[in-house]
Amino acid sequence: MNLEVFLGKSRFRNPLVLASGTFGYGLTYTDVIDRVGAFVTKGITVQERVGNPPPRIWDTKETVVNSVGLENVGLKRFKEEILPEIDISTPLYVNLAGVTIDDFRILIEGLRDEEKVEGFELNLSCPNVKEGGAALGQSADRVRKVASLARSLTTKSIWVKLTSNFCDVRETAAAAADAGADAVVIVNTLNALIIDLANRKPFLGGGSGGLSGPAIKPHVLYMVHQVSKQVDIPVIASGGAGCGTDVVEYLLAGASLVQIGSINLVDPQASLRILKGLEGWLKREGIVCVSELIGRLEGI
Ligand SMILES: Cc1cc2nc3c(=O)[nH]c(=O)nc-3n(C[C@H](O)[C@H](O)[C@H](O)COP(=O)(O)O)c2cc1C
């Protein structure tokens, strides 16, 4: 059985990608990382960030709402302390979280000569940071500017991670494709509010948060399908995947790779189970090559 997927020149051993913010920096559970197609780090900002006050997570079986607020070590510490320690055989993508377009220049210039880095995922969509990413990802014009700048600065892969909050993700995806991005990631968390009724206040320390987990999968499937019809670059799905057949559904809807996110918070080994489920399904269906499934949804 062939699980390989190619995105342009890049080869992935299988379609699973560990999603940003749900698997740390790649220093732990390296046995899991070494079995998936690609690994994306926690979002890195120019300066170190302490993130939002607690509570930062609200969850049920079907949903997670997080308000981490991009806590991270910042560019300098990532480069000097973390990157040298990362020892994985899987393509490493660094999630870059710029507050301004110029932040993306600083982040890419700081990391583009690092051999260990296969590519960058531009986070234009995090809804947690009041002054940050969401605003960039909500306008096709700004997406084009950031993606063009990134393209002019590096030949490494550029994935543009988009939002579907308050914008038309088909338009922003088309702008990213025009600007020369290698792929678009659909989508980051959806805006969400949890109310602490007893106190008549938001539950999360950061006020609002970002919704993820199984509850968002139908929405993200729809968006992946819409975007894959709109652009001619690969689409990477990110939203609630938790088993092998979720991955199959995303591939059929038009995704080339599928990110595994919130489920890692419950079980860091989840990807191995998902991979097994995917292999089992392919075997039962007599499908030899996983890439045959991409975009093969019928009747819509
Ligand atoms: C706790 C948490 C932290 C996250 N941090 C980031 C981040 O730093 N950068 C980013 O682009 N996405 C971040 N995300 C979004 C995930 O990468 C993913 O796109 C989203 O959760 C949807 O996928 P899922 O439903 O499989 O979790 C985070 C998600 C969670 C739950």
Image (cartoon, helix red, strand yellow):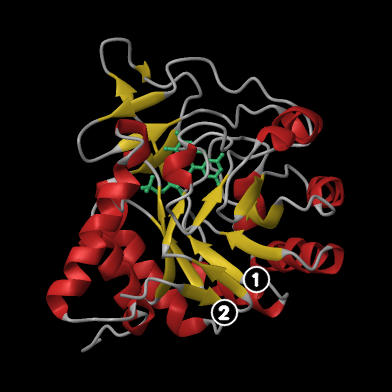
Depth check, mark 1 against mark 2: the one in front is: 2
Residue farthest toward the left in the current orientation of the protein: 284
Kindly tell me whether residue 190 is visible in this rendering: no
Against 240, residue 279 (above or below) is below
Q: Residue at x 28, y 29 (%)?
A: 59
- Amino acid type, mark 1: Ala
Q: Residue at x 18, y 68 (%)?
A: 281
How far apart are the alpha carbons under marks 1 and 2?
9 Å
Splitting the image into 4 quarters, where does residue 239 fall?
A: bottom left
- Nearer-N-terminus badge (1/2): 1
Against 265, residue 235 (above or below) is below
Residue nearer the viewer, 267 or 198:
267
Whether the residue under disc 2 has CB within 8 Å of ligand 1: no
Q: Residues within 10 Å of mark 2 (few under 14, many from 20)?
A: many
Residue 176 got which mark?
1
Against 3, residue 210 (above or below) is above
- Looking at the rendered structure, the secondary structure element under dot 2 is loop
Q: Give the mark count.
A: 2
The N terminus: image quadrant = bottom left
The C terminus: image quadrant = bottom left
Residue nearer the viewer, 152 or 36:
36
- Amino acid type, mark 2: Ile
Point out residue 35 in the picture as x, y percentages from the top left corner: 42, 52
Against 71, residue 213 (above or below) is below
Q: Residue at x 72, y 44 (%)?
A: 98
Splitting the image into 4 quarters, where does residue 263 fall?
A: top left
Kindly tell me whether residue 110 is visible in this rendering: yes
Splitting the image into 4 quarters, where does residue 90 fall?
A: bottom right
User: Mark 2 highlights which residue?
Assistant: 233
